[in-house]
Image: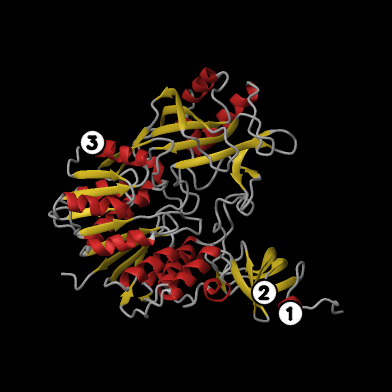
């Protein structure tokens, strides 16, 4: 019976707690399944293209809603059983139920869809994309619940850009040889379960509820022994975990970093205080961890039987044990003060032949095996001959800058975070690369100043961009246009903001030349993209 309240067609078609059978036709930007009931779009976490599912509606809006997966009635041919027992509850992975080849097809098409729909380009699929739907992301074109995607689309339309017609065929996505156990950095929140037992794991999606898990399928496998050792120490010495609600307790997170190519391990406890009681006991316990024995049971990749990449690297050893003080009521994990309990306040790793020093606060790509391939592709796109001046405008600790410096006459890095610039200078010295210079500040201020000081000598032949997820600030893009480089190499972690920024540059005289996606984060919805743009014709 119809309620006396006024209902629009949305209310009639779909209400909260309604149960439907649904065919999943596509996947959204964060890997959720997309289906329709009488033209009304529903997004279903843990469902994938090709599934027929039973769902319960949990939230409705005017043009779209969200539903919870209750039952898989008929699985997609690409559906696989997740290897992690808590894959659905945990917020770390979103695609473990998708076969790895289907993940690659979806990610590549996600990039292509954003470039075409938001950027106005004509990007063709590579062979990897196969015959998957041209309109992979109905979420983007019809419902757009993701605020960032909506904002990007509105920004593009408001600028009045004309349609761009240069045709580019995507190059095949750079896939991972083994999409498990690849992350070199982990942050385990610590707390108590409903029975008061100490636990560590990962937050459930969009919550701060800890899903207990010390054996994550995408983290380096040494973490299990480290985390269990820290929890045992806390239990034996009555060290309390942090409680967000009361802002009490001591240990907030267990952070680990692993030098995949050096074997060096850092263990850092993030604490709500200034010291850790009985800390020598923790140091002793950690230094007696037998990583060789603990990893012997994980000798091969669980998916394809191949030797996991980390096993082919240097023997593991702890080189740094430290504390990070964070006494603020905040969701930010790390504070600014670090004290060393053992060894150094940083470890070392390599990407190719370039060495990097990494502190708890350093930004460093979490998948170094794929990072090398990503940077090698950026270097290939730049096609340096040896005489070029390169400006790297989001240089961080110098990861891309130093890679490019191997083939450029000079690389100038710009980064707004002073500590990162200091780390970049140290990394340049560590690698004896004297053809680099790093500047702290905003690029739109630094670049004109240095150009004027040099009398025009500090021109830009190539500009590289590797911005955060929000993409480039418009002032920075204007600065790039004024620098007038022959080539721009853009490395992006978000296809939507990449497409927006590329359209801005193309409206000002640049053309899209090459596009290649890179899977840095197997089992998750994230994807990196490398793009080459140029003025005129490339030789």
What's the image's color scheme? secondary structure
**Of the image marks 1 and 3, the number of the one nearer the N terminus:** 1
Q: Nearer the viewer, mark 3 or mark 2?
A: 2
Neighbours of disc 1 within 10 Å: few (<14), some (14-19), many (20+): few
Instruction: Give the vertical position of 121 relative to 299 (above or below).
Output: below
Neighbours of disc 2 within 10 Å: few (<14), some (14-19), many (20+): few
User: Residue 301's spot in the image, x, y percent?
Assistant: 46, 48
Q: Is residue 407 visible?
A: no
Q: Residue at x 56, y 57 (%)?
A: 94
Where, by quadrant of the figure, is residue 512 drawn?
bottom left
User: Residue 481's spot in the image, x, y percent?
Assistant: 27, 64
As measured in the structure, the alpha-carbon distance from the residue carrying label 1 to the one carrying label 2 is: 9 Å
**Helix or strand or loop: what does disc 1 sit on?**
loop
Q: Nearer the viewer, mark 1 or mark 3?
A: 1
Could you say which is closer to the camera, residue 217 or residue 125? Answer: 125
Instruction: Give the vertical position of 221 relative to 55 (above or below).
Output: above
> Quick check: marks 1 and 2 in contact, CB under 8 Å?
yes
Neighbours of disc 3 within 10 Å: few (<14), some (14-19), many (20+): few
As measured in the structure, the alpha-carbon distance from the residue carrying label 1 to the one carrying label 3 is: 66 Å
Q: So how many labels did they put on this image?
A: 3
Left or right relative to 53: residue 417: left
Instruction: Give the vertical position of 456 relative to 508 (above or below).
Output: above
User: Mark number for residue 8?
Assistant: 1
Q: Which residue is mark 2?
A: 62
Q: Which residue is mark 3?
A: 429
**Helix or strand or loop: what does disc 2 sit on?**
loop
- Quarter of the C terminus within the rendering: bottom left
**Of the image marks 1 and 2, the number of the one nearer the N terminus:** 1
User: Mark number for residue 94?
Assistant: none
- Quarter of the N terminus within the rendering: bottom right
Left or right relative to 490: residue 3: right
């Amino acid at each position: 019976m119809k309620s006396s309240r006024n209902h629009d067609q949305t209310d009639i078609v779909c209400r909260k707690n309604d149960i439907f059978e649904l065919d999943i036709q596509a996947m959204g930007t964060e890997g959720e399944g997309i289906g329709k009931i009488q033209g009304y779009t529903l997004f279903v976490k843990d469902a994938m293209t090709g599934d027929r599912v039973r769902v319960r509606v949990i939230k409705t809006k005017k043009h779209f809603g969200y539903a919870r997966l209750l039952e898989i009635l008929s699985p997609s041919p690409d559906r696989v059983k997740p290897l992690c027992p808590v894959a659905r509850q945990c917020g770390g992975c979103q695609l473990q139920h998708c076969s790895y080849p289907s993940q690659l097809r979806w990610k590549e098409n996600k990039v292509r869809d954003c470039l075409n729909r938001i950027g106005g380009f004509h990007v063709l699929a590579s062979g990897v994309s196969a015959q998957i739907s041209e309109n992979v992301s109905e979420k983007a074109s019809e419902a757009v619940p993701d605020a960032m995607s909506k904002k990007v689309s509105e920004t593009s339309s408001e600028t009045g850009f004309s349609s761009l017609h240069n045709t580019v065929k995507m190059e095949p996505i750079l896939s991972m040889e083994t999409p498990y156990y690849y992350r070199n950095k982990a942050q385990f929140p610590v707390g108590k379960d409903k029975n008061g037992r100490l636990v560590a794991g990962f937050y459930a999606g969009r919550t701060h509820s800890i899903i207990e898990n010390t054996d994550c399928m995408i983290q380096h496998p040494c973490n299990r022994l480290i985390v269990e050792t820290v929890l045992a120490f806390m239990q034996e010495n009555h060290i309390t975990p942090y409680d967000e609600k009361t802002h009490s307790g001591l240990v907030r997170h267990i952070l680990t970093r692993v030098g995949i190519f050096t074997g060096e391990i850092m263990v850092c406890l993030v604490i709500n205080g200034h010291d850790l009681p009985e800390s020598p006991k923790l140091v002793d316990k950690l230094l007696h961890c037998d990583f060789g024995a603990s990893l012997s049971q994980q000798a091969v990749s669980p998916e394809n039987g191949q030797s996991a990449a980390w096993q082919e690297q240097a023997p593991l050893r702890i080189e740094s044990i430290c504390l990070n003080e964070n006494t603020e009521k905040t969701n930010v994990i790390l504070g600014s003060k670090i004290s060393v309990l053992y060894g150094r306040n940083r470890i070392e790793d390599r990407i190719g032949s370039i060495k990097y020093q990494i502190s708890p606060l350093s930004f460093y790509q979490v998948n170094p095996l794929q990072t090398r391939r990503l940077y090698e592709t950026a270097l290939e796109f730049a096609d340096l001959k040896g005489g070029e001046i390169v400006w790297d405008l989001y240089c961080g600790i110098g990861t891309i800058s130093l890679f490019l410096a191997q083939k450029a006459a000079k690389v100038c890095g710009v980064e707004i975070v002073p500590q990162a610039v200091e780390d970049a200078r140290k990394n340049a010295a560590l690698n004896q690369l004297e053809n680099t210079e790093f500047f702290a500040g905003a690029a739109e201020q630094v670049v004109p100043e240095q150009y004027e000081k040099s009398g025009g000598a500090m021109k830009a032949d190539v500009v590289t961009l590797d911005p955060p997820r929000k993409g480039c600030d418009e002032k920075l893009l204007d600065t790039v246009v004024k620098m007038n480089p022959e080539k721009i190499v853009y490395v992006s972690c978000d296809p939507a903001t990449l497409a927006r920024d590329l359209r801005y540059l193309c409206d000002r005289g640049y053309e899209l030349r090459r596009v290649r996606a890179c899977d840095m984060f197997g089992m998750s919805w994230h994807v990196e993209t490398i793009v080459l743009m140029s003025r005129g014709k490339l030789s």
